[in-house]
Image: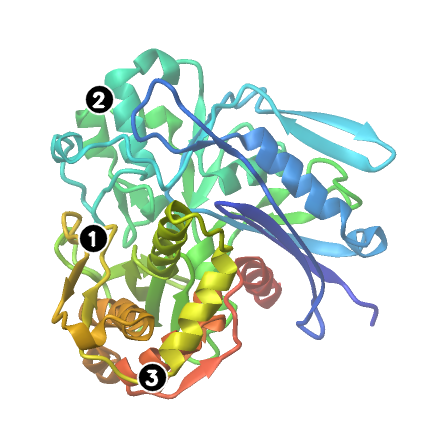
Protein backbone atom coordinates (compact mmCIF):
# COMPACT_ATOMS: atom_id res chain seq x y z
CA UNK A 1 0.00 0.00 0.00
CA UNK A 2 1.40 3.40 -0.96
CA UNK A 3 1.97 5.98 1.73
CA UNK A 4 -0.78 8.43 2.61
CA UNK A 5 -0.14 11.41 4.84
CA UNK A 6 -1.79 13.42 7.59
CA UNK A 7 -0.92 17.11 7.61
CA UNK A 8 -0.53 18.49 11.12
CA UNK A 9 -0.13 22.20 11.77
CA UNK A 10 0.39 24.28 14.87
CA UNK A 11 -0.24 28.03 14.82
CA UNK A 12 1.84 29.00 17.82
CA UNK A 13 2.43 32.25 19.66
CA UNK A 14 5.76 32.93 17.96
CA UNK A 15 5.99 30.41 15.11
CA UNK A 16 4.08 28.12 12.78
CA UNK A 17 5.00 24.47 12.31
CA UNK A 18 3.66 21.92 9.83
CA UNK A 19 4.44 18.20 9.61
CA UNK A 20 3.59 15.30 7.35
CA UNK A 21 2.85 12.07 9.22
CA UNK A 22 3.01 8.79 7.34
CA UNK A 23 -0.33 7.16 8.17
CA UNK A 24 1.10 3.62 8.03
CA UNK A 25 4.39 3.93 9.90
CA UNK A 26 3.06 6.77 12.12
CA UNK A 27 6.34 8.60 11.69
CA UNK A 28 6.99 12.18 10.63
CA UNK A 29 8.53 12.24 7.17
CA UNK A 30 8.77 15.99 6.68
CA UNK A 31 8.42 19.13 8.77
CA UNK A 32 8.84 22.86 8.44
CA UNK A 33 8.74 25.73 10.92
CA UNK A 34 9.19 29.48 10.65
CA UNK A 35 8.77 32.41 13.06
CA UNK A 36 5.72 34.58 12.42
CA UNK A 37 7.06 37.97 13.60
CA UNK A 38 3.38 38.83 13.89
CA UNK A 39 3.24 40.95 17.06
CA UNK A 40 1.70 44.39 16.55
CA UNK A 41 1.61 47.23 19.04
CA UNK A 42 -1.54 48.98 20.17
CA UNK A 43 -1.15 52.67 20.87
CA UNK A 44 -4.63 53.04 22.33
CA UNK A 45 -5.18 49.97 24.53
CA UNK A 46 -3.04 49.55 27.62
CA UNK A 47 -1.45 46.11 28.14
CA UNK A 48 -2.80 44.85 24.80
CA UNK A 49 -1.09 41.90 23.13
CA UNK A 50 -2.16 41.54 19.52
CA UNK A 51 -0.91 39.84 16.36
CA UNK A 52 -1.42 40.34 12.64
CA UNK A 53 -3.29 37.31 11.22
CA UNK A 54 -2.04 38.12 7.70
CA UNK A 55 1.53 37.51 8.87
CA UNK A 56 0.51 34.27 10.54
CA UNK A 57 -1.17 33.00 7.34
CA UNK A 58 1.83 34.15 5.25
CA UNK A 59 4.08 32.13 7.57
CA UNK A 60 1.76 29.14 7.20
CA UNK A 61 2.11 29.47 3.42
CA UNK A 62 5.89 29.64 3.83
CA UNK A 63 5.86 26.42 5.87
CA UNK A 64 3.59 24.65 3.39
CA UNK A 65 5.76 25.68 0.43
CA UNK A 66 8.73 23.99 2.11
CA UNK A 67 7.01 20.57 2.15
CA UNK A 68 7.33 18.15 -0.82
CA UNK A 69 4.46 18.90 -3.16
CA UNK A 70 4.24 15.30 -4.37
CA UNK A 71 3.48 14.24 -0.77
CA UNK A 72 0.97 17.05 -0.23
CA UNK A 73 -1.10 15.64 -3.10
CA UNK A 74 -1.34 12.43 -1.03
CA UNK A 75 -2.65 14.12 2.13
CA UNK A 76 -5.79 12.33 3.37
CA UNK A 77 -6.65 14.60 6.33
CA UNK A 78 -5.66 17.99 7.75
CA UNK A 79 -5.30 18.55 11.49
CA UNK A 80 -4.98 22.03 12.97
CA UNK A 81 -3.93 23.12 16.45
CA UNK A 82 -2.91 26.48 17.82
CA UNK A 83 -2.55 28.93 20.65
CA UNK A 84 -5.51 28.78 22.98
CA UNK A 85 -7.55 31.52 24.72
CA UNK A 86 -7.06 34.16 22.00
CA UNK A 87 -9.80 35.58 19.78
CA UNK A 88 -10.02 36.79 16.18
CA UNK A 89 -13.03 38.46 14.53
CA UNK A 90 -14.06 38.30 10.87
CA UNK A 91 -16.96 38.75 8.47
CA UNK A 92 -18.34 35.32 7.73
CA UNK A 93 -19.09 36.10 4.06
CA UNK A 94 -15.73 37.69 3.24
CA UNK A 95 -13.25 36.34 5.80
CA UNK A 96 -10.63 35.60 3.18
CA UNK A 97 -9.79 35.94 -0.49
CA UNK A 98 -8.61 32.94 -2.51
CA UNK A 99 -6.09 33.33 -5.29
CA UNK A 100 -4.26 30.96 -7.60
CA UNK A 101 -0.74 30.92 -9.02
CA UNK A 102 1.83 28.42 -10.26
CA UNK A 103 2.26 27.31 -6.66
CA UNK A 104 -1.43 26.51 -6.28
CA UNK A 105 -4.37 28.01 -4.43
CA UNK A 106 -3.91 30.12 -1.31
CA UNK A 107 -6.12 32.31 0.84
CA UNK A 108 -5.46 35.71 2.35
CA UNK A 109 -7.26 37.18 5.38
CA UNK A 110 -9.82 39.80 4.47
CA UNK A 111 -12.17 41.78 6.70
CA UNK A 112 -10.54 40.37 9.85
CA UNK A 113 -9.42 41.96 13.10
CA UNK A 114 -6.06 41.59 14.76
CA UNK A 115 -5.68 38.48 16.89
CA UNK A 116 -6.04 39.30 20.59
CA UNK A 117 -3.72 36.70 22.11
CA UNK A 118 -3.72 34.73 25.36
CA UNK A 119 -1.04 37.15 26.65
CA UNK A 120 -3.39 40.12 26.42
CA UNK A 121 -3.65 42.08 29.66
CA UNK A 122 -6.37 44.64 28.95
CA UNK A 123 -8.88 43.06 31.35
CA UNK A 124 -8.00 44.34 34.82
CA UNK A 125 -8.89 42.43 37.98
CA UNK A 126 -11.62 45.01 38.66
CA UNK A 127 -13.09 44.48 35.20
CA UNK A 128 -12.97 40.69 35.56
CA UNK A 129 -14.67 40.86 38.97
CA UNK A 130 -17.52 42.83 37.38
CA UNK A 131 -18.32 39.96 34.98
CA UNK A 132 -20.98 37.36 35.76
CA UNK A 133 -19.84 34.11 37.35
CA UNK A 134 -19.49 31.33 34.77
CA UNK A 135 -21.15 27.94 34.94
CA UNK A 136 -17.84 26.18 34.43
CA UNK A 137 -15.07 24.58 36.44
CA UNK A 138 -12.57 26.97 34.85
CA UNK A 139 -12.07 30.57 35.94
CA UNK A 140 -12.03 33.45 33.46
CA UNK A 141 -8.82 35.46 33.11
CA UNK A 142 -7.54 38.30 30.97
CA UNK A 143 -6.59 37.03 27.52
CA UNK A 144 -9.52 34.59 27.47
CA UNK A 145 -11.74 34.99 24.40
CA UNK A 146 -14.99 35.72 26.22
CA UNK A 147 -13.29 38.19 28.57
CA UNK A 148 -11.86 40.06 25.56
CA UNK A 149 -15.30 40.15 23.90
CA UNK A 150 -16.85 41.45 27.13
CA UNK A 151 -14.18 44.17 27.17
CA UNK A 152 -14.98 45.25 23.59
CA UNK A 153 -18.70 45.10 24.31
CA UNK A 154 -18.24 47.60 27.13
CA UNK A 155 -15.50 49.85 25.82
CA UNK A 156 -15.75 49.61 22.00
CA UNK A 157 -19.09 48.12 20.94
CA UNK A 158 -18.80 49.71 17.49
CA UNK A 159 -15.75 47.55 16.86
CA UNK A 160 -17.76 44.36 17.35
CA UNK A 161 -20.52 45.57 15.02
CA UNK A 162 -18.05 45.30 12.11
CA UNK A 163 -17.87 41.50 12.41
CA UNK A 164 -20.19 38.51 12.38
CA UNK A 165 -17.93 35.68 13.60
CA UNK A 166 -15.28 35.01 16.24
CA UNK A 167 -12.90 32.14 16.92
CA UNK A 168 -9.34 31.25 17.73
CA UNK A 169 -6.75 31.67 14.97
CA UNK A 170 -6.88 27.91 14.39
CA UNK A 171 -10.68 27.96 14.16
CA UNK A 172 -10.39 30.71 11.57
CA UNK A 173 -7.98 28.65 9.43
CA UNK A 174 -10.30 25.63 9.54
CA UNK A 175 -13.26 27.82 8.50
CA UNK A 176 -11.34 29.32 5.59
CA UNK A 177 -10.00 25.96 4.37
CA UNK A 178 -13.54 24.56 4.41
CA UNK A 179 -15.11 27.68 2.90
CA UNK A 180 -17.52 27.86 5.83
CA UNK A 181 -19.57 30.97 6.53
CA UNK A 182 -19.95 29.78 10.12
CA UNK A 183 -17.34 28.56 12.55
CA UNK A 184 -17.03 25.48 14.76
CA UNK A 185 -14.99 25.15 17.95
CA UNK A 186 -13.99 22.11 19.98
CA UNK A 187 -14.44 21.95 23.73
CA UNK A 188 -10.67 22.22 24.11
CA UNK A 189 -10.60 25.72 22.62
CA UNK A 190 -14.02 26.80 23.89
CA UNK A 191 -13.05 25.96 27.48
CA UNK A 192 -10.03 28.22 27.09
CA UNK A 193 -12.37 31.15 26.34
CA UNK A 194 -14.40 30.81 29.54
CA UNK A 195 -18.20 30.58 29.97
CA UNK A 196 -18.24 27.08 28.54
CA UNK A 197 -19.51 23.91 30.22
CA UNK A 198 -17.25 21.03 29.26
CA UNK A 199 -19.69 18.47 30.73
CA UNK A 200 -22.53 19.77 28.52
CA UNK A 201 -20.23 20.85 25.65
CA UNK A 202 -22.11 24.14 25.33
CA UNK A 203 -21.75 27.83 26.05
CA UNK A 204 -23.32 29.42 29.15
CA UNK A 205 -25.92 31.00 26.86
CA UNK A 206 -28.36 32.16 29.55
CA UNK A 207 -25.60 33.79 31.61
CA UNK A 208 -24.05 35.46 28.56
CA UNK A 209 -27.36 36.69 27.15
CA UNK A 210 -28.30 38.06 30.56
CA UNK A 211 -25.07 40.08 30.62
CA UNK A 212 -25.67 41.56 27.16
CA UNK A 213 -22.92 39.48 25.55
CA UNK A 214 -23.04 39.34 21.71
CA UNK A 215 -23.72 35.60 21.57
CA UNK A 216 -24.17 35.66 17.78
CA UNK A 217 -20.36 35.87 17.51
CA UNK A 218 -19.81 32.54 19.29
CA UNK A 219 -18.73 29.53 17.20
CA UNK A 220 -20.69 26.27 17.28
CA UNK A 221 -19.28 23.65 19.71
CA UNK A 222 -18.08 20.28 18.35
CA UNK A 223 -16.53 17.22 19.94
CA UNK A 224 -12.73 17.23 20.02
CA UNK A 225 -11.47 14.90 17.30
CA UNK A 226 -14.42 15.57 14.97
CA UNK A 227 -14.15 16.44 11.30
CA UNK A 228 -15.24 20.05 10.72
CA UNK A 229 -15.61 19.81 6.95
CA UNK A 230 -13.65 19.37 3.75
CA UNK A 231 -11.29 21.64 1.84
CA UNK A 232 -13.28 23.88 -0.48
CA UNK A 233 -10.37 24.17 -2.91
CA UNK A 234 -7.01 22.68 -3.77
CA UNK A 235 -4.52 24.18 -1.28
CA UNK A 236 -0.75 23.91 -1.74
CA UNK A 237 -1.31 20.67 -3.65
CA UNK A 238 -3.71 19.15 -1.10
CA UNK A 239 -6.77 18.11 -3.12
CA UNK A 240 -10.15 19.75 -2.74
CA UNK A 241 -12.63 17.74 -0.65
CA UNK A 242 -9.93 16.58 1.81
CA UNK A 243 -11.28 16.16 5.38
CA UNK A 244 -10.27 18.90 7.85
CA UNK A 245 -10.46 18.27 11.58
CA UNK A 246 -12.05 20.76 13.92
CA UNK A 247 -9.20 22.76 15.48
CA UNK A 248 -7.68 21.50 18.72
CA UNK A 249 -5.78 23.13 21.56
CA UNK A 250 -2.01 23.22 21.28
CA UNK A 251 -1.61 22.07 24.89
CA UNK A 252 -3.72 18.95 24.48
CA UNK A 253 -1.99 18.09 21.21
CA UNK A 254 1.44 18.56 22.74
CA UNK A 255 0.52 16.10 25.51
CA UNK A 256 -0.92 13.64 22.96
CA UNK A 257 2.40 13.68 21.11
CA UNK A 258 4.39 12.22 24.00
CA UNK A 259 2.09 10.68 26.63
CA UNK A 260 2.82 7.02 25.88
CA UNK A 261 0.75 5.58 28.71
CA UNK A 262 -2.05 6.72 31.00
CA UNK A 263 0.34 6.39 33.93
CA UNK A 264 2.71 8.99 32.42
CA UNK A 265 2.92 12.57 33.59
CA UNK A 266 4.23 15.12 31.10
CA UNK A 267 6.45 18.03 32.11
CA UNK A 268 7.09 20.70 29.50
CA UNK A 269 9.61 23.26 30.70
CA UNK A 270 10.17 25.98 28.13
CA UNK A 271 9.33 29.66 28.52
CA UNK A 272 6.70 28.72 31.10
CA UNK A 273 6.13 25.28 32.63
CA UNK A 274 3.30 22.76 32.59
CA UNK A 275 3.03 19.52 34.52
CA UNK A 276 0.07 17.31 33.66
CA UNK A 277 -1.37 13.83 33.97
CA UNK A 278 -4.57 12.15 32.79
CA UNK A 279 -7.48 11.90 35.20
CA UNK A 280 -9.51 8.66 35.46
CA UNK A 281 -12.15 8.25 32.75
CA UNK A 282 -15.00 8.67 35.26
CA UNK A 283 -13.69 12.00 36.61
CA UNK A 284 -16.01 15.01 36.31
CA UNK A 285 -14.86 18.46 37.45
CA UNK A 286 -16.96 20.59 39.77
CA UNK A 287 -19.40 23.00 38.17
CA UNK A 288 -17.92 26.18 39.64
CA UNK A 289 -14.36 27.51 39.36
CA UNK A 290 -11.89 27.64 42.22
CA UNK A 291 -9.65 30.61 41.38
CA UNK A 292 -7.31 29.82 44.28
CA UNK A 293 -6.56 26.29 43.08
CA UNK A 294 -3.19 25.84 41.33
CA UNK A 295 -4.61 22.83 39.43
CA UNK A 296 -6.85 23.25 36.41
CA UNK A 297 -8.67 20.48 34.57
CA UNK A 298 -8.42 20.81 30.80
CA UNK A 299 -10.76 18.84 28.54
CA UNK A 300 -8.82 16.18 26.63
CA UNK A 301 -10.38 13.49 24.40
CA UNK A 302 -13.34 11.12 24.79
CA UNK A 303 -14.80 13.19 27.64
CA UNK A 304 -11.67 12.84 29.77
CA UNK A 305 -9.61 15.53 31.48
CA UNK A 306 -6.00 16.44 32.13
CA UNK A 307 -4.97 17.71 35.56
CA UNK A 308 -2.67 20.63 34.80
CA UNK A 309 -0.33 22.75 36.87
CA UNK A 310 0.42 25.57 34.45
CA UNK A 311 3.16 27.76 35.93
CA UNK A 312 3.79 31.18 34.43
CA UNK A 313 7.37 30.97 35.71
CA UNK A 314 9.69 28.56 33.91
CA UNK A 315 12.60 29.11 31.58
CA UNK A 316 11.65 32.78 31.47
CA UNK A 317 13.00 33.10 35.04
CA UNK A 318 16.45 31.98 33.94
CA UNK A 319 16.18 34.25 30.90
CA UNK A 320 15.40 37.19 33.19
CA UNK A 321 18.42 36.35 35.38
CA UNK A 322 20.65 36.15 32.30
CA UNK A 323 19.27 39.45 31.02
CA UNK A 324 19.94 41.09 34.38
CA UNK A 325 23.56 39.94 34.39
CA UNK A 326 24.24 41.03 30.80
CA UNK A 327 22.66 44.40 31.56
CA UNK A 328 24.86 44.84 34.63
CA UNK A 329 27.98 43.92 32.68
CA UNK A 330 27.02 46.33 29.92
CA UNK A 331 26.94 49.12 32.48
CA UNK A 332 30.53 48.16 33.34
CA UNK A 333 31.43 48.41 29.66
CA UNK A 334 31.58 44.65 29.07
CA UNK A 335 29.62 43.13 26.19
CA UNK A 336 28.77 39.43 26.64
CA UNK A 337 26.22 37.49 24.61
CA UNK A 338 23.26 35.97 26.47
CA UNK A 339 24.11 32.44 25.30
CA UNK A 340 27.63 32.71 26.72
CA UNK A 341 26.27 33.90 30.06
CA UNK A 342 23.71 31.08 30.13
CA UNK A 343 26.25 28.33 29.46
CA UNK A 344 28.64 29.78 32.06
CA UNK A 345 25.88 29.85 34.68
CA UNK A 346 25.01 26.21 34.03
CA UNK A 347 28.66 25.17 34.29
CA UNK A 348 29.05 27.08 37.57
CA UNK A 349 25.95 25.43 39.01
CA UNK A 350 27.12 21.96 38.00
CA UNK A 351 30.21 22.46 40.19
CA UNK A 352 27.90 23.47 43.06
CA UNK A 353 25.82 20.33 43.69
CA UNK A 354 23.76 21.80 46.53
CA UNK A 355 22.90 25.15 48.10
CA UNK A 356 21.14 26.50 51.15
CA UNK A 357 20.17 29.69 49.30
CA UNK A 358 16.42 29.82 48.71
CA UNK A 359 14.85 31.46 45.64
CA UNK A 360 11.09 31.67 45.15
CA UNK A 361 11.10 32.53 41.42
CA UNK A 362 7.49 33.70 40.93
CA UNK A 363 8.53 36.90 39.15
CA UNK A 364 5.35 36.88 37.07
CA UNK A 365 2.98 35.72 39.79
CA UNK A 366 0.79 32.71 39.08
CA UNK A 367 -2.79 32.52 37.81
CA UNK A 368 -4.00 31.24 41.18
CA UNK A 369 -1.88 33.86 43.01
CA UNK A 370 -1.34 36.81 40.64
CA UNK A 371 0.06 39.17 43.29
CA UNK A 372 2.95 36.92 44.33
CA UNK A 373 6.45 38.18 43.57
CA UNK A 374 9.92 36.66 43.61
CA UNK A 375 11.74 36.23 46.90
CA UNK A 376 15.35 35.40 47.82
CA UNK A 377 15.99 34.23 51.39
CA UNK A 378 18.55 32.51 53.58
CA UNK A 379 21.28 34.71 52.11
CA UNK A 380 24.77 34.43 53.60
CA UNK A 381 28.27 35.47 52.46
CA UNK A 382 29.02 31.86 51.57
CA UNK A 383 26.16 31.27 49.12
CA UNK A 384 26.38 34.27 46.80
CA UNK A 385 28.48 32.70 44.05
CA UNK A 386 27.04 32.27 40.56
CA UNK A 387 26.92 28.53 41.18
CA UNK A 388 24.85 28.89 44.34
CA UNK A 389 22.48 31.45 42.85
CA UNK A 390 21.94 29.55 39.60
CA UNK A 391 21.36 26.27 41.43
CA UNK A 392 18.89 28.01 43.77
CA UNK A 393 16.96 29.51 40.84
CA UNK A 394 16.70 26.15 39.07
CA UNK A 395 15.62 24.48 42.31
CA UNK A 396 13.08 27.25 42.88
CA UNK A 397 11.51 26.74 39.45
CA UNK A 398 10.90 23.05 40.23
CA UNK A 399 9.87 23.73 43.84
CA UNK A 400 7.27 26.19 42.57
CA UNK A 401 5.82 23.47 40.32
CA UNK A 402 5.88 21.04 43.24
CA UNK A 403 3.86 23.43 45.41
CA UNK A 404 1.26 23.57 42.62
CA UNK A 405 1.23 19.82 41.96
CA UNK A 406 2.93 17.95 44.83
CA UNK A 407 4.79 14.70 44.10
CA UNK A 408 2.35 12.95 46.45
CA UNK A 409 -0.50 13.92 44.14
CA UNK A 410 1.27 12.29 41.19
CA UNK A 411 1.91 9.11 43.16
CA UNK A 412 -1.67 9.01 44.44
CA UNK A 413 -2.92 9.31 40.84
CA UNK A 414 -0.88 6.26 39.85
CA UNK A 415 1.76 8.15 37.86
CA UNK A 416 4.79 5.93 37.31
CA UNK A 417 7.13 8.18 35.33
CA UNK A 418 7.56 11.72 34.05
CA UNK A 419 8.12 12.49 30.39
CA UNK A 420 10.42 15.52 30.50
CA UNK A 421 10.53 17.88 27.55
CA UNK A 422 10.93 21.49 26.53
CA UNK A 423 13.76 23.76 25.44
CA UNK A 424 14.68 24.95 28.94
CA UNK A 425 14.97 21.39 30.22
CA UNK A 426 16.89 20.08 27.22
CA UNK A 427 19.64 22.73 27.47
CA UNK A 428 20.03 22.85 31.26
CA UNK A 429 21.48 19.86 33.10
CA UNK A 430 20.93 21.61 36.45
CA UNK A 431 17.17 21.76 35.86
CA UNK A 432 17.25 18.02 35.14
CA UNK A 433 19.08 17.35 38.41
CA UNK A 434 16.63 19.46 40.38
CA UNK A 435 13.63 17.83 38.66
CA UNK A 436 14.85 14.41 39.76
CA UNK A 437 15.50 15.71 43.29
CA UNK A 438 12.08 17.34 43.70
CA UNK A 439 10.00 14.61 42.03
CA UNK A 440 10.97 11.07 43.14
CA UNK A 441 9.88 9.35 39.93
CA UNK A 442 11.76 8.02 36.90
CA UNK A 443 12.17 10.75 34.27
CA UNK A 444 12.39 10.04 30.55
CA UNK A 445 14.00 12.79 28.47
CA UNK A 446 14.02 13.40 24.75
CA UNK A 447 10.29 12.93 24.17
CA UNK A 448 9.77 16.54 23.14
CA UNK A 449 6.20 17.72 23.06
CA UNK A 450 5.09 18.82 19.61
CA UNK A 451 1.59 20.11 18.94
CA UNK A 452 1.87 19.77 15.16
CA UNK A 453 2.86 16.11 15.52
CA UNK A 454 0.21 15.59 18.18
CA UNK A 455 -2.68 16.90 16.08
CA UNK A 456 -1.54 14.73 13.13
CA UNK A 457 -1.45 11.70 15.47
CA UNK A 458 -4.95 12.48 16.75
CA UNK A 459 -6.55 12.40 13.32
CA UNK A 460 -4.43 9.50 12.10
CA UNK A 461 -5.72 7.48 15.06
CA UNK A 462 -9.31 8.44 14.20
CA UNK A 463 -9.27 7.54 10.50
Specify how the rendered protein is coloured: rainbow
Q: In which quadrant will I find the N terminus?
A: bottom right
Q: Is residue 162 left or right of residue 33?
A: left
For discs 1 and 3, the disc positioned in front in the rendered view: 3
Q: Is residue 368 left or right of residue 332?
A: left
Q: Give the Cα distance between marks 1 and 2.
A: 22 Å
Q: Is residue 340 left or right of residue 236?
A: left
Q: Position of residue 146 (x, y in %)?
A: 30, 34
Q: Is residue 414 visible?
A: no
Q: Give the Cα distance between marks 1 and 3.
A: 32 Å
Report the residue marked by disc 3.
Answer: 436
* Element at label 3: helix
* Element at label 2: loop
Q: Which residue is depicted at the point 74% across and 40% down?
A: 235
Q: Is residue 234 visible?
A: yes
Residue 362 falls in which quadrant of the image? bottom left
Residue 311 falls in which quadrant of the image? bottom left
Report the residue marked by disc 2.
Answer: 212
Rate crowding at label 1 as few (under 14), some (14 to 19) or many (20 or more) other CA atoms within 10 Å: many
Q: Which residue is depicted at the point 59% across and 21% down?
A: 110
Q: Which residue is depicted at the point 65% across and 49% down?
A: 243
Q: In which quadrant will I find the C terminus?
A: bottom right
Residue 342 falls in which quadrant of the image? bottom left
Q: Earlier in the sequence, mark 3 or mark 2?
A: 2
Q: Give the Cα distance between marks 3 and 2.
A: 50 Å
Q: Position of residue 139 (x, y in %)?
A: 20, 47
Amino acid sequence: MSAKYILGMDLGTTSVKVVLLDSLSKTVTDSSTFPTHSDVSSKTIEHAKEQDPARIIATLDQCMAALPREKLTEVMCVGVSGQMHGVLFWKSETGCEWSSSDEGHRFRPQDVSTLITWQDGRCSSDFLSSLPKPESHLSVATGFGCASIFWYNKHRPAFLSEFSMAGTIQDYVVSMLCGSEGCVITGQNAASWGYFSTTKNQWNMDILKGAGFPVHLLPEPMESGSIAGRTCSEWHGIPANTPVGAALGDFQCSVYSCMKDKTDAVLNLSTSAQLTFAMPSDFTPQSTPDPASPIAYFPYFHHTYLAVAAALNGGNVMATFVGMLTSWMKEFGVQVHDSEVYSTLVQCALTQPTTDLCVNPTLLGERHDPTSLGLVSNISPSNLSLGHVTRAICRGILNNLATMMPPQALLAAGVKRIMGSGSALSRNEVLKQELERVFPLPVVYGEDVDSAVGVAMVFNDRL
